[in-house]
Image (cartoon, coloured by chain):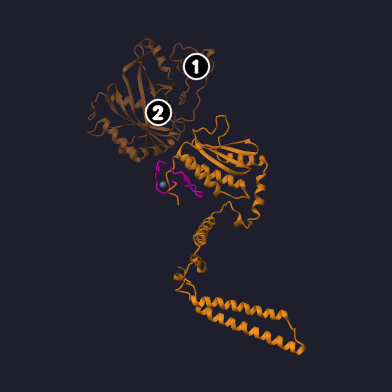
Chain colours: A brown, B orange
Amino acid sequence: MCFLPRREREASIYKSLLQIDLKDYIVSAEPPSPSQGLVQPYVQTSGTMGVTCVSQMPVAEGKSVQQTVEILTRKLELLGAEKQGTFCVDCETYHTAASTMGNQGQAGKLMYVMHNSEYPLSCFALFENGPCLIADANFDVLMVKLKGFFQNAKANKIESRGTRYQYCDFLVKVGTVTMGPSARGISVEVEYCPCVVANDCWNLLMEFMQSFMGNHTPGIPSVFGNKHDSIYSPGDTMAQYMELFNKIRKQQQVPVAGIR
Amino acid sequence: MAEGVLSPGVNLEAFSQAIAAIQALRSSVTRVFDCLKDGMRNKETLEGREKSFVSCFQESLHSVSRDLSELERLSNLVGKPSENHPLHNSGLLSLDPVQDKTPLYSQLLQAYKWSNKLQYHAGLASGLLNQQSLKRSANQMGVSAKRRPKAQPTTLVLPPQYVDDVISRIDRMFPEMSIHLSRPNGTSAMLLVTLGKVLKVIVVMRSLFIDRTIVKGYNEDVHTEDGKVDIWSKSNYQVFQKVTDHATTALLHYQLPQMPDVVVRSFMTWLRSYIKLFQAPCQRCGKFLQDGLPPTWRDFRTLEAFHDTCRQ
Ligand SMILES: [Zn+2]
């Protein structure tokens, strides 16, 4: 089950939702007190997201990450894209703590807690190939309280920061992926806002990416594969970022030429 | 100043003589009628009176004929104003020395240009309109312009039940299209058409005539804050703003005042072709995008997809 995140301003806590979706993992969470009154359901806001493709742009030969980002953004600007502020997507890794493991031999499951500046009031919790939970930003506080069950692997914190561009109905976010102090790679997120069914506009999206990524245009993202004609959701974008970050973490061992 | 312009074509001396000749002619003609009016009088004998009247009449007729031939002679001498002027004699208005006070000539030129342009464009428009089979004007079907205002009200007072039937029949015709009919403001129907997971269309009707249409994205809100269908605000996406423009063009194209249900059905059939808005490449250039937009135009007959700039 996957709710849509909120882009609107007012903040209220939806503890009841956390309770529903985390009941397998959370031993006890406070039920909403009746005095609190309004516990509104999550509603689909008018600004839901369009179909998005997240991919990695390899660092150009003989260039730094910074220089490659500059080449890419210059191409976008030449195309007519307009700068529209910045963006940030971050991801923290949690191990399921040993105390909750029924079977000692089983390896702990990893949970990723992510934030996206596009949804400042939301927090995303994902398992690999598993469900995606969208909660209020207070979820972070809850995770601290649950440190007996989930332990933060602080060294694994990874994030992508960069500039947001708009071109016609497309949103493009070119980010530098950093882990700790060092730049590890480049992420390119392309969203086609008017369309909500991933497979409907893949060809169109690809043609657009080719116009500035050339032969580094990615193949169809794996999350598109099991969507059929269902509505694309922000959780799908976070799953793509999670995959990308995992891929980049693995590249960590192999020193990549050109990264300074 | 005026002489300078006139002199090549016109002999001024002869001109003034001709004017004098006209005056002479007029006075001799007046004399003829005076003579007729006075009749026979002031003579003792009847014979004397007759004789003097006839001779007087004869004399005045002679002078008329003399003056007339003089005028004809002079008019040949006057010469002709330059005939190659595009506005012929009205071109002489440019010689009017009081130009600055009454800009008659420049206004005349302007009007002439406009009328020329109007004629040209009207010709083009009539050529184009004649190619359309369904058209707003019923002139081609032999209905005179005078009858048209009378024909419309009859279709404007169709019972709401009939409108409901037509719409629900269309709704059943296209499974991927759902039409929700409401009447928030009296008898006029408002349709909310949802096409697959591609777009939503707000259609404002007047009886069975489509008055206004707005296309929005599937994920866009079509209601105002108080829950009513929002018939005014446009889509946030450029692609749907473009499709809205094309849909408005389609409303003007699909017109057949005597059969409004056929018009609504044709329009909906055309609208349904947008189910592949993001999937169909342009039939001319073969690409998906042009200036960041997919092929937003659908041909009215073949329903093929084209970029706005790729259609003929
Ligand atoms: Zn084209």
Which quadrant of the figure contains the N terminus of chain B? bottom left
Could you say which quadrant of the image residue B71 lies in?
A: bottom right
Query: Which residue is nearer to you in this view: B107 or A200?
Result: B107
Type of the residue with mark 1: Ser
User: Does the rendering let one see residue A88?
Assistant: yes
- Mark 1 nearby-residue class (10 Å; few <14, some 14–19, many ≥20): some
Rounded to the nearest whole Å, what is the CA distance between mark 1 and mark 2? 25 Å
Residue named by callout 2: A237
Q: Please state the extent of the stretch shown in magenta in the rendering.
A: B283-307
How far across and how far down the image is residue B294, in percent?
A: 43, 42
How far across and how far down the image is residue B191, in percent?
A: 58, 38
Residues at marks 1 and 2 on the same chain: yes
Residue lying at the far right in this picture: please name it: B45
The structure residue drawn at horizontal position 69% and vertical position 79%, both measured from the top left corner, is: B34
What secondary structure is marked by label 2?
Answer: helix
The structure residue drawn at horizontal position 40% and vertical position 17%, both measured from the top left corner, is: A140
Q: Which mark is residue A16?
A: 1
User: Does the rendering let one see residue B107?
Assistant: no
Query: Which residue is nearer to you in this view: B55 or A68?
Result: B55
How far across and how far down the image is residue B160, in percent?
A: 66, 40
| Main secondary structure type of the part rendered in magenta | loop
What secondary structure is marked by label 1?
Answer: helix
Disc nearer the start of the sequence (1/2)? 1
A230 up-or-down from B253: above or below: above
B155 up-or-down from B226: above or below: below
Query: Which residue is nearer to you in this view: A252 or B236?
Result: B236
Q: Is residue A248 magenta?
A: no
Tell me the subunit letter for badge 1.
A
The structure residue drawn at horizontal position 47% and vertical position 46%, both measured from the top left corner, is: B297
